[in-house]
Image (cartoon, helix red, strand yellow):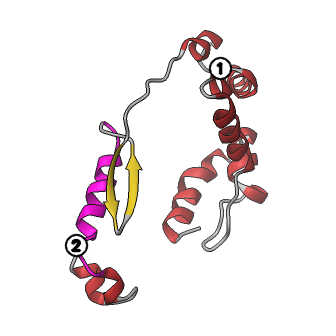
């Protein structure tokens, strides 16, 4: 856990400590993770495996959709089973750039993916490896 993530987790996560659906996943031992602490999220990993195996139905139907509906009902939410069943995601062609011989793919605008690729294109112009990890000019030259 980085310093920024730990601080954000403390500030924005702890107000939800009394909600078991949140705290059981995001607040190990009832606390926000501390700087340097590892954080694993097996529930998200399971969800991603389901989506990988079943595509859109891995999320919008079956056990994940059931869990979403259960939580929505418990929290007086407004999502309906039809909202989930009727949703059809759009496939978009990813955009890419190369960075030191690696091809990096992102989702296209209107996401922040293009910003990440642009930053990699800018950073590739600087000899960061040559400057070293802690060189002052590494942060002042970019």
* Residue 125 disc label: 2
Q: Quadrant of residue 29?
A: bottom right
Q: Main secondary structure of the magenta part?
A: helix
Q: In the picture shown, does residue 134 fall above or below 104?
A: below
Which residues lie in the magenta part? 110-127
Q: Residue at x 32, y 81 (%)?
A: 128
- Number of numbered markers: 2
Front-most of residues 106 and 65:
106
Q: Residue at x 74, y 22 (%)?
A: 62
Question: Is 80 part of what is drawn in magenta?
Answer: no
Mark 1 or mark 2: whose residue is earlier in sequence: 1
Query: Which quadrant of the rendered structure holds the C terminus?
Result: bottom left
Q: In the picture shown, does residue 13 fall above or below 2?
A: above
Q: Please tell me whether mark 1 sits on a helix, a strand or a loop.
A: loop
Front-most of residues 135 and 13:
135
Mark 1 neighbour density, 10 Å: few (under 14) some (14–19) many (20 or more): few
């Amino acid at each position: 856990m980085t310093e920024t993530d730990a601080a954000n987790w403390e500030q924005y996560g702890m107000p939800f400590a009394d909600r078991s659906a949140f705290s059981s996943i995001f607040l190990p031992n009832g606390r926000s993770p501390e700087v340097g602490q590892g954080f694993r999220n097996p529930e998200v990993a399971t969800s991603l495996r389901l989506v990988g195996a079943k595509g859109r139905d891995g999320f919008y139907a079956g056990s994940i959709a059931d869990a979403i509906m259960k939580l929505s009902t418990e929290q007086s939410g407004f999502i309906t089973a039809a909202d989930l069943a009727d949703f059809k995601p759009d496939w978009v062609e990813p955009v890419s750039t190369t960075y030191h011989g690696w091809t990096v793919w992102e989702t296209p605008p209107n996401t922040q993916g293009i910003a990440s690729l642009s930053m990699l294109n800018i950073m590739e112009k600087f000899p960061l490896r040559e400057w070293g990890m802690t060189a002052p000019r590494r942060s002042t030259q970019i």
